[in-house]
Amino acid sequence: MNDYDVLVIGGGPGGYVAAIRAAQLGLRTALVEKQHLGGICLNWGCIPTKALLKGADVAHTLAHLDQFGFSVENPRFDIQKLVQHSRDVSATLTGGIAYLLNKYGVEVIRARARLIDKGMVSVTADGTESVLRAAHVILATGARPRSLPGIQTDGQRIWSYFEALTPSELPRSLLVIGSGAIGMEFTSLYNDLGCQVTLVELNERIMPAEDAEVASLMAKSFERRGVRIHTQTAVTTVDDSNLNSLHCQLRHRDGHEQSVSVDRVLLAAGIQANIEDLGLEALGVELQDGFIKTDAWCRTNVFGLYAIGDVAGPPCLAHKASHEGVLCVEKLAGVEGVHPLDYDYIPGCTYSRPQVASLGLTEEQARATGRTIKVGHFQYKANGKALAMGDSEGFVKTLFDADSGALLGAHMVGPEVTEQIQGFGIAHSLEATEEALQQVIFAHPSLSEAMHEAILAASGRALHQ
């Protein structure tokens, strides 16, 4: 039997980061991963989608070259080359993770793991089973696409994001079910590559987790691009009996039924935790809404057992998983000054066109707290850098507590906002007030000037609108 201080199950962005941090702190650490280091994020999610979306950006640029004085006749596109680029990027990063784990002395065990008792884990590889023992076991098994009743992915015409990332050819038409980050990114991607996309959302608006003004702008933007949007609508059946097309039955909230025929369907209606066959039942591990229940330090109700990342519940984001991995390990190792994660201020990013980034409370949520709030807006169409880039759609919105000046929320739509939201994150972390942020000097010309103007606008002090 092998003994460890820390045993991590799952090698995604939460698991491998937790293992590295544990090893850095001098703990004897092992990481059990049955398939790919890097997990879904590096292999089938965050990273490869961004590589494909870069191709979509190129397609959009080619379609608007005349604005910058260029013309290109009959550009050719090979979807397989773009897909291969995305796979190469993923392979490079996963190779880097293997290097880092080796560098810090983490033992990587390629096997399937199952809890058999407190601090005891059975691992099985190639039919051979062994038992590992650890003082601390961290579950980082992630999540997978959620199916809908009566609609199952088939790997060919009814897709999850796995198949959407590796198409053999571009479909002429695509129906996307769900308008969270995954659904919005694939809608944007396939629309820019020339597909007719229909987006279906059960809620009253697309991007239901975002601020209402953000969702409204995104709906208008996508509709101008030719995306057909159906909100308050369910896809009740997908008939695949016809080899030439899929016949989808839509039911609107008012009871109206509609049929839509498409080449492919993408299920992007959320995820579900990978909790099966882990031995949770035998140990009496508590669950909540299908995820493992944890406290502020990622501890489960079983002593010595922890859960981080997607398996521990939303928001299901790679950076949240990594942060949990670090704080979990540092807390169990007795590092001083560790702070629990503030789940209200985890940045959320959607890499569609235009991009969306948000932090903190929406306006609706802020008003529901009973505070008196101040709201600032600034449009990118009044930002010189955005106009020079030919990309001025969108805005920055700030929310402040009128009494304390605390930053309650920031919501951004527009060019490269996913790279700018960290500015508001730093401000919140340092407890910067509205007054303090007004005094910050933002470089000119820059997109980030819109952030400053939105801060000023909350007090009626915007200079350029």
Image (cartoon, rainbow, N blue to C red):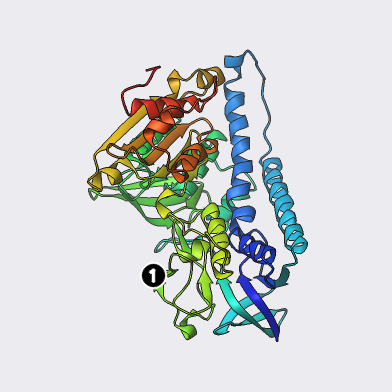
Q: Report the side of 145 relative to 34 (left or right).
A: left
Residue density around tag 1, few if under 14, some if 14–19, many if 20 or more, within 10 Å: few
Q: Report the side of 378 relative to 252 (left or right).
A: right
Residue projecting furthest to the top: 69
Residue 202 lies, with reference to residue 443, above or below; the image says below
Q: Residue 217: give x, y in percent of width and height.
A: 38, 32
Q: Which of these two is toward me, 268 or 97?
A: 97
Q: Residue 367: give x, y in percent of width and height.
A: 25, 43
Residue 428 lies, with reference to residue 5, above or below; the image says above
Q: Give the residue drawn at x 66%, y 24%.
A: 74
Q: Give the residue drawn at x 62%, y 77%.
A: 113
Instruction: Count numbered badges in the picture.
Output: 1
Q: Residue 441: give x, y in percent of width and height.
A: 50, 25
Q: Residue 64: give x, y in percent of width and height.
A: 57, 21
Local secondary structure at mark 1 = strand
Give the image quarter of residue 40: bottom right
The amino acid type, in three-letter code, at marker 1 is Gln
| Quadrant into which the N terminus falls | bottom right
Q: Give the residue drawn at x 48%, y 71%.
A: 299
Q: Report the side of 26 relative to 430 (left or right).
A: right
Residue 430 lies, with reference to residue 311, above or below; the image says above
Q: Is residue 12 visible?
A: yes
| Quadrant into which the C terminus falls | top left
Q: Report the side of 142 relative to 235 (left or right).
A: right
Q: Is residue 395 visible?
A: no
Name the residue that disc number 1 marks.
288
Give the image quarter of residue 78: top right
Q: Give the residue drawn at x 59%, y 39%.
A: 53
Residue 290 lies, with reference to residue 79, above or below; the image says below
